[in-house]
Amino acid sequence: MSATKGPKIVVIGAGSYFFGKPVIYNAVTSPILQKGTLALVDTDPEVLDTMMKIANRAVEHKNVPLTVIGSTDRTEVMKDADFVVLSFSFRNSYYRGLDTRITKKYGITMCSSDTIGPGGAFRALRELPEVLRIADDVRKLCPNAWVINFVNPTATLGIGLMRYAPDIKSFALCDGNHMPYCLRWPLEHVGIIQPGEEPTPEMLEKLDMTIAGVNHCTWILRCSYDGKDLIPQLKEFTRTASAKEYEKVPSFKAKPRLNENYRRVLTELYDAFPTAVSHTKEYVPFFQGTGVMPNDPEPLITFDGYNRQEEMDKAWAATQKFATGETPIEEFFKQGHGDHATDIIESMWGNLGKKFYINCANRGAVPNLPDDAFLELLCDLDMENGPQPLPACDMPRGLWGLTCRVLDTHELTAQAAVECDRHVLLQALAGDPLTTNLEDVRMIIDELLEAEREHLDDKWFK
C-alpha cells in the first residue's frame, strides 16, 4: 500500500444490475481510487465491452490516471490484486422466479427469494461453489487480497468463505445499511432533519444507534439523540406511516408492497425496527397466510421475476447508451453515485478511519451470540485486520431465537452447498423459519434440484 499509488480492484460481475456503474463512478471520482487499477471481469463479452467503454469514457472525461483493464477470464487480471469484489449472478431473475414458483406449489411464499427459504438456499447452491473457485484463484494469484462478497445470499456465502476458505481474507456486504446514509432514517422520521437533508457532523455525534442481526434480518435495537430515547417516536412514526400507506394503491411488486405495515407489526412484536423490511418480512412465518385468522396486513405475494427481468433489461438499455455516447458521459456523472464496496475500499486503502456495517464474525460484539456468529455489525476497518466489530448490545429475547434459527439455516446451507449433500440440505430447510411441513420440503428439494440441474454440481445427482 502506498499513499501515492491506488489499489488494484478486480470486479467479478462488472455488468451487475446494482453495482456496475457505481463502482466506475467511485473509481473515477475518488482521489484515492483513481490512482490505481480497475479490472473489470464479465463472462459475457458484450457486457464486458459495454462496461469497458463506459469506464474508459469516464476516465477520459475526468482526465484521471486510473488504469482500466478487462477480461472475460478473471485469472488474466487477478494477479497482485488488492481487492476482489464479487458481484456476479447467473440468470438472476430466471432462477429466482423458478425458485419462487416451485416453492409456492408447496405452500411457501417468498417475496424476494434470494436469502431465506428454499430460494435463498438454492441460490447459495448455485453461487457458493463459484465463490470458492474464485477463492482458489485468489490463493494462487493474489493471496494478500481482500475478497469482498456482494452476492446474495451474502450471509450464507460469507459463512462459506469463513468456513471453507479460512486462509482467504474476506468479508461480506449488503447495501441496506450503507454508511452514512442509513443514519438519516431515524433522524428524518423523528423530524430532526427534513427528507433528503444531510445531517451535520454535530447531529451525527449526538446520535447513538445500534443495528445488529443477520443480513436482511437486521434491527435497530437502540436509538437515542442527545441522550433522549427515540424509540417511542419511531414507533409513533411507524404507526402513522402504516395508516397513510392504506390511503394509496399498494404496489403490485412483492418487495415494496405494504412495507410500513409489515414494519409496524414487526416493530410492535419485537420492540425493534427492521432496517430491511422488504426482506425481513420474508424471514418470519407470520405473513405466509397459513393460519386461521386473517394476516395483518396481508399474506405476502410472490417475487415478480418477470417484472424484475423487464426492469433489468430497461436499465441495461440505458447503460448501453452511455457506452455508445448516445447519452453524454456528463449525464453519467450527474446521475452517478458511489457504492458500498468501493466506499469501504477507499477508506481501507486511504486509512480514512471510517466505520461501516459489515457482515463478518461477531467476535463478542453481541455478547449473547457466539463469537463466530456471522452478523451485520458496525465495524472499524483497516488493510491489516479488515473488519473489527464494535461493541453492540445483547440481542433481545424473541429476536435472539429468530437470529439463531436463521444462522443455523445459513450454516447448514453453506455445508450442503460444499458437500452436495441432500440430507444436510433437508436439515437446513427443516430449520428454516418458513418451513411447516417436512414432506413438502422433500418435494421442493427434489423438484428444484431437477429444474436447476444444468447449473448445479453433478455430485447432487450421484
Image (cartoon, grey):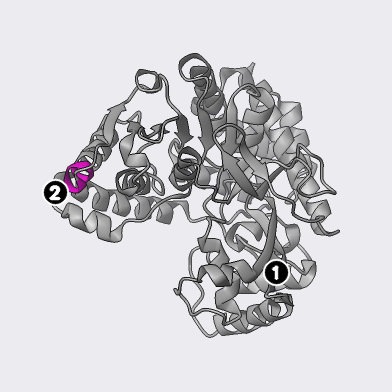
Is residue 81 shown left or right of residue 162? left
Is residue 25 shown left or right of residue 379? left
Determine which residue is flagged by label 2.
325
Is residue 61 covered in magenta?
Answer: yes
CA separation, marks 2 and 1?
A: 47 Å
Q: Amino acid at mark 2?
A: Gly
Is 245 rendered above or below residue 208? Answer: below
- Residue 319, percent across and down? 26, 49
Determine which residue is flagged by label 1.
223
Determine the main secondary structure of the stretch shown in magenta: helix
Q: Secondary structure at mark 2?
A: loop
Is residue 238 shown left or right of residue 39? right
Is residue 243 covered in magenta?
Answer: no
In this view, the residue in front, 74 or 392, is 392
The count of marks equals 2
- Residue 135, percent across and down? 54, 23
- Viewport quadrant of the N terminus: top left
Disc nearer the start of the sequence (2/1): 1
Q: In the rendered structure, which segment of residues is drawn in magenta?
A: 57-62
In this view, the residue in front, 461 or 395, is 395
Task: Residue at 49%, 14% (x, y): give it.
Answer: 140
